[in-house]
Image (cartoon, rainbow, N blue to C red):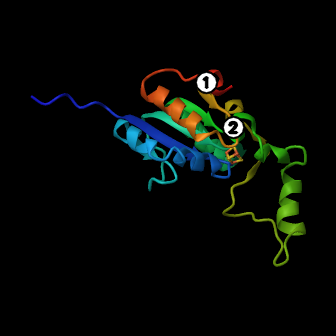
Amino acid sequence: MSAPAVSKVRLATVWLDGCSGCHMSLLDTDERLIEIAPLIELVYGPLVDLKEFPQGVDVTLVEGAVSSEEDLHKIRQVRARTRVLVSLGDCAVSGNVPAMRNKFGAQAVLKRAYLENATLDAQIPREIIPRLLSESRPVHEVVPVDVYVPGCPPPADLIFSVLSDLLAGKTPNPAAKFG
Ligand code: SF4
């Protein structure tokens, strides 16, 4: 008789207002990804060709701050469909780089980027580009967060340690390991 199949952890990664450096650091876990591959099912992320965030996700790693109406809609949907939500990196944890615009206001930033710095056809886009929120917020100010992984980006060793704990059903404590 064959052994019962072990259910895999349904893992997602999400990219909000970030530079992709946190995802790069995840990939920097290198060959250790092969170690965890049999334990996970990657159900959503920049490397998965799926437009709609799926239901029933066990763990979601979120890179980036919440800066636009699109980010806001997405993170609310992600939270509703995820069991353990992880703020990955300083932009998600504290606002970091995206939040540097908060003291100037969204309009001033759009004006600077699309009018003052434009050399051709200067205009603030009103279609296609998602509308900016008045301030860029860390994820926990918008939805509840279960685990915080700081760093810009968080070191690959820290990400691997947190993922290993989560896959083993433990509650990670990144501050205790690398604080
Ligand atoms: Fe990029 Fe740093 Fe923000 Fe990660 S925390 S998205 S590496 S700026």
Q: Is residue 81 visible?
A: no
CA gap, disc 2 and disc 1 = 13 Å
Query: Which circle marks residue 151 in the picture?
Result: 2
Q: Quadrant of residue 94?
A: top right
Q: Is residue 177 visible?
A: yes
Q: Identity of the amino acid at label 2?
A: Gly
- Tell me where residue 5 appears, x and y as whole percent: 23, 32
Residue at image coords 82%, 70%: 123
Q: Secondary structure at mark 1?
A: helix
Residue 111 lies, with reference to residue 103, above or below; the image says below
Residue at image coords 59%, 46%: 25
Residue 117 lies, with reference to residue 30, above or below; the image says below
Residue closest to the eye, 108 or 8: 8
Residue 103 lies, with reference to residue 148, above or below; the image says below
Q: Quadrant of residue 64?
A: top right
- Count residues near mark 2 (Cα–Cα under 10 Å), then give few for <14, some for 14-19, many for 20+: some
Query: Where's the C terminus, which quadrant?
Result: top right
Task: Looking at this view, name the residue that lies furthest to the bottom.
Answer: 120
Residue at image coords 75%, 39%: 95
Q: Identity of the amino acid at label 1?
A: Lys
Query: Which circle marks residue 49 in the picture?
Result: none
Q: Along the polypeptide, which appears first: circle 2 or circle 1? A: 2
Residue underneath mark 1: 177
Query: Where's the N terminus, which quadrant?
Result: top left
Residue at image coords 70%, 42%: 152
Residue 134 appears left or right of 66? right
